[in-house]
Amino acid sequence: MVLLPLGLIVLISAIDSSISPNIHLGPLLVVAPAITPSFAGTRLTTLIGLLALVAQAVIAALHGGLLTPNHQAQLAALAVVSAVVVAYTRIRERHGHELDRVRTVSAAVQRVLMRPLPDRAGPLRIATRYLAADDEAAVGGDLYAAVRTPHATRLLIGDVRGKGLDAVGDAAALIGAFRVLAHRYEDPAALADALEASYVRHLAELAENGQDVQENFTTALVLDLPDRSPTARIADCGHPPPLLLTPGGAHPLPLRRTAPPLGTGALGPVERRTEEFPFPPGSTLLLYTDGATEARDTAGTFYPLPARAAGFPTDTPHALLDALRRDLLAHVGGRLRDDAALIAVSRTD
């Protein structure tokens, strides 16, 4: 790419020096420093600008001298434009460094807040993917966590109202509570009740600090996957139902006892119940947030998750989520409007 502006400088200088003195192509030299920031930094842009000024001076010396008003005006204009381009390149580099630092911090927050789930947990194989809506954030309002107990694996997936960094605080509070409480409650519904109480205390603390939390809530699924029983025990708190992928296709689990989202207990009494479903060896559970199902293409069509998931490979959870991620981003044109979290869990023999 560096050869492009250098070649333009040589070409314009050669043509201008060989044609009539009444025709001035020297002003075209400004193209060289103007295109350099598209692939280079401040130093190289400055160098190309200086080379363009040298070439303009050579052209002026061959066509009447450097002291003619026309050539002096061309040199001054080229110097001003080159200086502006260099200043722009410097500002762009500074903003790029700041964005890199933000992304580094976001990645560190994600590693601490949502530690990668284990690839294996007892008879389970697990994979996760997180797609953040904000370019500068690697983590947002969608959350997931896993806790291993002596005889089961407990999973949490949720979606905090909002997206991006504004929802990270609520997500951190719920994940921290889940990691502590998952060892105390075997029943997913009882665990969801305990998470509700912890989340309400968190919101009360925010309200005491002057934050508006009246519309804060989190949809969530709490799952208990026993090692010795091919079942999935689920308590639903306003979250989309998981998909069960088998050789026969992909089908949402028919949850019948859906409770309101976490954080809405103040609106009235909430009764949560645990439901149990078959989860046989060789099948896969796909957990997701509404950032995946509500993703739209340019025509406004929602992403058909069950239909698409049925056609993806289920050899491993990682292969399934890799195919799903590519297809989802292709559907929306490369950028989601809302955070999306995906968890695939398969049971081995």
Image (spheres, helix red, strand yellow):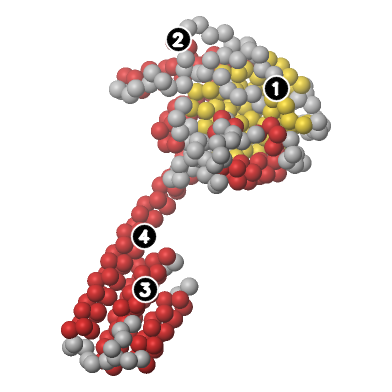
- Going 31% across and 67% down the picture, which residue do you hit? 86
> Is residue 344 visible to the viewer in this orientation of the structure?
yes
Q: Which residue is mark 1?
A: 253
**Crowd rating for badge 1 (residues with CA inside 10 Å; few <14, some 14–19, many 20+):** some
Q: Secondary structure at mark 3?
A: helix
- Earlier residue among tags 3 and 2: 3
| Mark 4 or mark 1, whichever is nearer to me | 1
Residue 296: x and y, percent?
56, 37
Whether residue 275 is situated above or below residue 25 in the rendered picture: above
Residue 190: x and y, percent?
59, 13
Q: Which residue is mark 4?
A: 93
Q: Amino acid at mark 4?
A: Glu
Q: Secondary structure at mark 1?
A: loop
Mark 4 and mark 1: Cα distance apart in space = 50 Å
Which mark identifies residue 31?
A: 3
- Earlier residue among tags 4 and 3: 3
Circles 2 and 4 in contact, beta carbons < 8 Å: no
Q: Amino acid at mark 2?
A: Leu
| Mark 4 or mark 3, whichever is nearer to me | 3
Mark 2 and mark 4: Cα distance apart in space = 50 Å
